[in-house]
Image: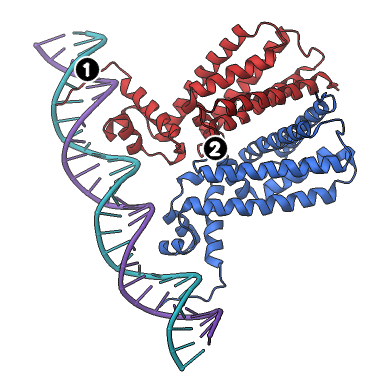
Chain colours: A red, B blue, C purple, D cyan
Amino acid sequence: MADVQRRRPGETREKLMTAALTLVGKGRHFASIGIREVTRQAGVVPTSFYRHFRSVDDLGLQLVDELGLVLRRMMREARANVLQADKLIEESVAIFVAHALANRNFFMFMAQGLAGESRAVQEGIRSEMRYFANELANDLRRLRLLEHLSDSDLDMTCDLVVRTVAFSLTDILSISPEDDYQIGQVRKRTTRFLQLVLIGAGHWKSA
Amino acid sequence: MADVQRRRPGETREKLMTAALTLVGKGRHFASIGIREVTRQAGVVPTSFYRHFRSVDDLGLQLVDELGLVLRRMMREARANVLQADKLIEESVAIFVAHALANRNFFMFMAQGLAGESRAVQEGIRSEMRYFANELANDLRRLRLLEHLSDSDLDMTCDLVVRTVAFSLTDILSISPEDDYQIGQVRKRTTRFLQLVLIGAGHWKSA
DNA sequence: ACTGCATGTGTACAGTTGTTCACATAATGT
DNA sequence: ACATTATGTGAACAACTGTACACATGCAGT
């Protein structure tokens, strides 16, 4: 009975994932979301959930994987747009903020997951951040920046940069997306943070 | 009926609060904790909850207030122990890490709350961090450090310091409290982060 | 044409949830 | 001494939860 299978494969799966993100975007915390709630939001019967995920945590894990894709797309855009080094920081921050606003729910999920209750999700996000920091280090080497730093000191610097940006995420997400003034403030402040860090790195003496 | 009121006033209230923290310490996320769960953990009948709190969120808010006390106690200790400036960073980080380990559940709650679902709790934690940053700025002025920075640039620097330390919190909490080696690593890494930031601040030219 | 698989649906059930109500006791102020 | 207040209790309820089961349908490979 009912209109079965007029859908393309994986459609319900996708609907469930975006439903979860939608709930997160509405202010709910991922850890407090239940199966029935997700399926209701997705317009699907509860039983369908089990066809695709073992549990809500499992869904979270698969979201983290997609998070990787979003970040990589962002990085590619940043690489394409940042050509000369002088506007590097400002431009990168702008791109990040733009992505955070465009994928608000996604980044909210990420911000929650960092201190979330699923150890696996936590580790996944952490590893995405590590990957991000590594790519940043590679880029800096390629651009011949901070050449006096040892590999490990460069890693540390990039780690700090990524953390700083990640923390700014909570600033961005805590203000209304339409409040352009506040967004601009966060952008400016984050830019200055990074300048401070990179000035520090420039004067750092690798043992 | 039952052994009523052989307790001192506020005892149940306290039991409920520590019960909530205990649950958080066990890995549960605060947003997913319910009234019945808290009361069960506290060994109290569900109805008692309403005598002290309007809801779980309300309990969270009151926890944030106590958080302020913990932080202030920590700061006092730091001020007493850090007399000469050269070991300032290392010593402060050590004190922070020690407090984070000693009040693990509390700090876990704080880390969760930063991206939690209660806007009020979020704002409370944020304001605690601001307070912390301001005190830090005062201390630095008193110690005649970074005197070339304008007030607003000093504020920015302190803000970044506090954020960096706060992020390290998630590192500390994600490893086992008995793993002394890993703890040491986090301590070292955080120290270097702060050194990097302060070197940057030392070379910063206030417009 | 037939079989197995992936995907979807509806019904059912036992356990848990938040909240209310009427009631009991000790402490407190008069 | 007595009324009030703060704090505790147990029973009850309707709403919701996760999960299991039997079943229907289209698709892919034989």
Residue at 66% x, 45% y is B128
Q: Is residue D24 above or below residue B54?
A: above
* Quadrant containing the N terminus of chain A in the rendered view: top left
Residue at 28% x, 15% y is A8
Q: Helix, strand, or loop for circle 1?
A: loop
Residue at 39% x, 26% y is A18
Chain letter of the residue carrying label 1: A
**Residue A135 visible (yes or no):** no
Residue B84: quarter of image: top right
Which residue was labeled with disc 2? B115
Point out residue A167 in the picture as x, y percentages from the top left corner.
Answer: 62, 31
Residue type at mark 1: give it: Arg
Foreground residue, A180 or B108? A180
Instruction: From the image, state whether disc 2 or disc 1 is nearer to you.
Output: 2
Image disc number at residue A96: none
Which residue was labeled with disc 1? A6
Point out residue A174 in the picture as x, y percentages from the top left corner.
Answer: 54, 34
Q: Helix, strand, or loop for circle 2?
A: loop
Residue type at mark 2: give it: Ala
Residue B40: quarter of image: bottom left
* Number of other residues with Cα within 10 Å of mark 2, as a class: few under 14, some 14 to 19, many 20 or more: many
Residue B35: quarter of image: bottom left
Residue lying furthest front in this view? A181
* Disc 2 from disc 1: Cα separation: 39 Å
Q: Is residue A78 above or below residue B35?
A: above
* Number of other residues with Cα within 10 Å of mark 1, as a class: few under 14, some 14 to 19, many 20 or more: few
Judged left or right of residue B179, residue A171 is left
Judged left or right of residue C11, residue B78 is right
Q: Is residue A32 above or below residue A17?
A: below
